Image (cartoon, rainbow, N blue to C red):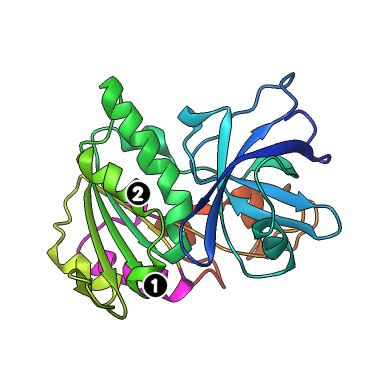
């Protein structure tokens, strides 16, 4: 978009119900005159008239354009309004904003993706993008492992996508905090799954989820010998403008909306309040 102050209109083409709290809204920009692209890890400012604006991670890969996925958990006035919308309704979007995941540096690496709950949304684009690159057999990761934790089996999001990833060769390992009837998978913290994952000099770990999960996952990865530069996560702060103007997401001399939301552990070390 050439003007990031003014929202562009986007139409909802499809709504995918991921679980009781999360829906994926597949959008398409109505204005085709300006080229739009992004990289995994970037976010949009999503707006609904009379309900405000919020930062939402893009959950699709740029290879899926012109369609753009936003996976949204119902948590407040704006997200509740979005969840009440139907296909063909329109919303406003600004962006893309933020520093993306360094996908170009993943070539030849073993990608270890660790996610909790809605934290899989921004990482989904990385996996889809990497699988696309593998199909092209150029600049692709060597292999991918997903460790994904949810509260209960009913809370697992992106179930159809995970099944597709497994068929494409991604090693998907799921766990839940609390089992339900007919659940045959693991029960426990997502960090428990790390014990069975070898960490080598070729490992790049991506971590996204609740802050406490991120802290424990990073600590486990460091203890297992994963290099600080190879541990990459996202920071969540309240963003009002997305462009580094308002200062709401200020953190120890940096602005999360501009300098992040993607950071390596090497960058986070020494940043007061980043934990």
The secondary element bearing badge 2 is classed as: helix
Question: Which span of residues is magenta-colored?
Answer: 210-232
Q: Residue furthest bottom?
A: 178
Q: Quadrant of residue 190?
A: bottom left
**x, y (%) of residue 62?**
50, 32
Q: Looking at the image, is 94 positioned above or below residue 120? A: above
**Callout 2: few (<14), some (14-19), or many (20+) C-alpha neighbours within 10 Å?**
few
Q: Residue at x 16, y 59 (%)?
A: 197
Left or right: where 68 falls relative to 174: right
Q: Which residue is mark 1?
A: 213
Q: Work out whether residue 244 can be spotted.
A: no
Q: Are marks 1 and 2 in contact (CB under 8 Å)?
A: no
Q: Which mark is residue 160?
A: 2
Residue sitting nearer the eye, 210 or 91: 91
Q: Quadrant of residue 188?
A: bottom left
Q: Residue at x 22, y 73 (%)?
A: 182
Residue sitting nearer the eye, 126 or 161: 161
Residue sitting nearer the eye, 20 or 256: 20
């Amino acid at each position: 978009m050439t003007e990031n102050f003014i929202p562009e209109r986007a139409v909802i083409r499809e709504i995918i119900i991921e679980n009781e709290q999360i829906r994926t809204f597949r959008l398409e920009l109505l204005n085709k005159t300006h080229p739009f692209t992004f990289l995994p890890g970037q976010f949009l400012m999503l707006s609904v008239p009379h309900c405000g604006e919020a930062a939402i991670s893009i959950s699709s890969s740029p290879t899926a354009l012109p369609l753009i996925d936003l996976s949204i958990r119902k948590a407040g006035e704006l997200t509740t309004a979005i969840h009440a919308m139907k296909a063909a309704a329109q919303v406003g979007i600004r962006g893309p904003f933020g520093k993306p995941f360094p996908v170009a540096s993943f070539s030849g690496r073993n990608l270890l993706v660790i996610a909790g709950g809605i934290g899989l949304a921004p990482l989904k684009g990385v996996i889809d993008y990497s699988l696309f690159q593998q199909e092209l057999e150029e600049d692709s990761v060597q292999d991918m492992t997903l460790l994904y934790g949810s509260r209960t089996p009913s809370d697992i999001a992106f179930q159809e996508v995970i099944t597709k990833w497994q068929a494409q060769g991604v090693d998907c390992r799921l766990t839940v905090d609390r089992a339900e009837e007919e659940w045959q998978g693991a029960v426990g913290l997502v960090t428990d799954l790390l014990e069975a994952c070898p960490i080598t000099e070729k490992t790049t770990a991506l971590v996204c989820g609740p802050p406490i999960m991120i802290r424990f996952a990073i600590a486990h990865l460091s203890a297992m010998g994963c290099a600080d530069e190879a541990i990459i996560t996202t920071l969540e702060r309240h963003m009002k403008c997305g462009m580094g103007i308002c200062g709401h997401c200020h953190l120890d001399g940096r602005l999360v909306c501009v300098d992040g939301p993607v950071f390596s552990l090497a960058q986070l070390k020494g940043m007061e309040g980043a934990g």
